[in-house]
Image (tube, rainbow, N blue to C red):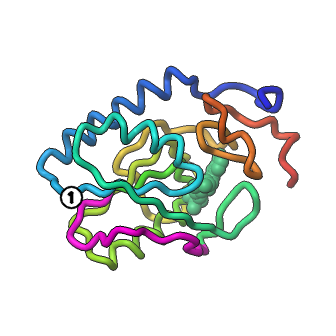
Amino acid sequence: MHDDIERILLSKEEIKTKVKELADRITEDYEDSDSLVVVCILKGASVFFADLIRKINRQVQLDFMSISSYGDSRSSSGVVQIRKDLDINIYGKDVLIVEDIMDSGQTLAYLCEMLAARDPSSLKICALLDKPERRIADIQPDYCGFQIPDEFVVGYGLDFAEKYRNLEYIGVLKPELYSD
Ligand code: IMP
Ligand code: MG
């Protein structure tokens, strides 16, 4: 598994420090909220979500959404299908979406529009990674762990063809492994 990685972009320690930083900001920003719903976008955000929520020092409700965006194996098209919707009714609640990476932004743009229509009290995005160079949709994360260059990364939840999600670090995949 590790042999397929060209180089480590973010070490386990760097990620851990950043997750704590993000969680501290969230804890502070939601001081006055008594209805925070933290939403994990499956499967990519699962590892980040699990670490992040345990560092948020507030009462939270957790929920999960599974979406599939059509596209090739390395990018999304913005056409999104809901595979699993939220269980919680978010009307009047403070919703924080947790995502692994924002690339073109099309997946989150679609999702935010859909969730905003349910009238939450607030709707924000926390993305561990951001590739701003690739943005197509007019959307930015409210909380961002790291801005990264336009390279395909895996690990800490992120996959290529469902593999590498269980790496403890985030690494750049060897380009010869893409089946373009
Ligand atoms: P967007 O709609 O283009 O922003 O696509 C976001 C989704 O594309 C993420 O949730 C990931 O599933 C996937 N993605 C984008 N870039 C990468 C990457 O470098 N590694 C793994 N998945 C990625
Ligand atoms: Mg994904």
Confirm whether residue 132 shows in the render. no
In the rendered structure, does residue 137 fall within the stretch colored magenta? no
Give the residue at x 48% y 52%: 99
> What SS does tag 1 mark?
loop
Q: Residue 47 versus residue 24: which sits nearer the camera?
A: 47
Residue 50 position in % (x across, y down)? 46, 41
Is 6 placed left or right of 124 in the picture? right
- In the displayed structure, 20 sits above or below 59; it is above
Give the residue at x 31% y 72%: 89
**Quarter where residue 78 is shown:** bottom right
Give the residue at x 43% y 51%: 98
Residue 9 position in % (x across, y down)? 62, 28
Q: Residue furthest bottom?
A: 117
Quarter containing the C terminus: bottom right
Magenta span covers which residues?
79-95
Q: Residue 118 versus residue 10: which sits nearer the camera?
A: 118
Residue that carries the numbered disc 1 in the rendered image: 35
- In the displayed structure, 140 sits above or below 110; it is above
Mark 1 residue crowding within 10 angstroms, few (<14) / some (14–19) / many (20+)? some
